[in-house]
Amino acid sequence: MDTGIDYSHSDLAESIWNNSGETGVDSNGQDKRSNQIDDDANGYVDDWRGWDFFNNDNDPFDDHGHGTHVAGIIGAMGNNSLDITGIAWQSSLVGLKFLSEYGYGDASDAAEAIVYATTIGAKITNNSWGSSSFTQVLYDAILFNKAHGDYLLRLPEIVVEILIFMVFIHLVSISTTLFQ
Ligand SMILES: [Ca+2]
Ligand SMILES: [Ca+2]
Ligand SMILES: [Ca+2]
Ligand SMILES: [Ca+2]
């Protein structure tokens, strides 16, 4: 949940989530991704790879850069000789864009994105953003998420991944020291 994801990025492209309800062909032989029909009846037309809640369109492409940056830390593909390796690089990534090209957005769009993430069964949402004021609509969305059993951050999994990452960093620093 951020400014979107550059889903064409070579180190991320293979990990981008696809909505099975909006892919394939419909009964008229049209591509469900672009038939302008809400094939899975979830309230979003042609949302085959996430949603742009800021611009209200089906293209969550990152026009800022921050969302792609954090997506890379989480899920950049490992063992591919490209760029970096994410701390959980076998994850499936869905871009839920609610922040603009300037990095700001509305709590109501964030709330919609949380509900969307909950509905598609996302296990974790990354929330690298904040607000200084309480918003009821956001609070309600968090309660909705909680009621569906999927906490926004599943702490044990996150902790394990961070520990693995720290061990990795430690090994890198040891090997760097050895080879100096
Ligand atoms: Ca849909
Ligand atoms: Ca469609
Ligand atoms: Ca867009
Ligand atoms: Ca990589």
Image (cartoon, rainbow, N blue to C red):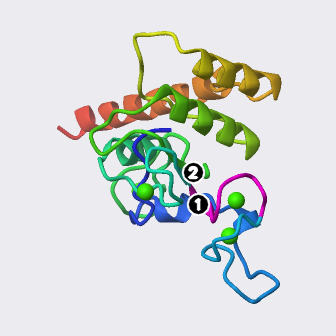
Q: Return the mark for residue 109.
A: none
First in sequence, mark 2 or 1: give its number: 1
Looking at the image, the residue that sits furthest to the left is 180
Task: Give the x, y percent position of residue 72.
Answer: 41, 47
Q: Is residue 152 visible?
A: yes
In percent of width and height, residue 19 lies at 69, 61
Provide the residue designation for mark 1.
Answer: 49
Query: Is 42 colored magenta in this rendering?
Result: yes
Residue 94 got which mark?
2
Q: Amino acid at mark 1?
A: Arg
Cα separation between marks 2 and 1 = 7 Å
Point out the quarter of the image occupied by ligand 2. Answer: bottom right
Amino acid type of the residue that numbered disc 2 sits on in the rendered structure: Val
Say which quadrant the C terminus sits in. Answer: top left
Q: Which residues are magenta?
A: 40-50
Pick the residue in front: 168 or 112: 112
Categorize mark 2 by other alpha carbons within 10 Å: few (<14), some (14-19), many (20+): many
> Residue 109: percent from the left, percent from the top?
52, 35
The answer to whether the residues at label 2 and label 1 have Cβ atoms under 8 Å apart is yes
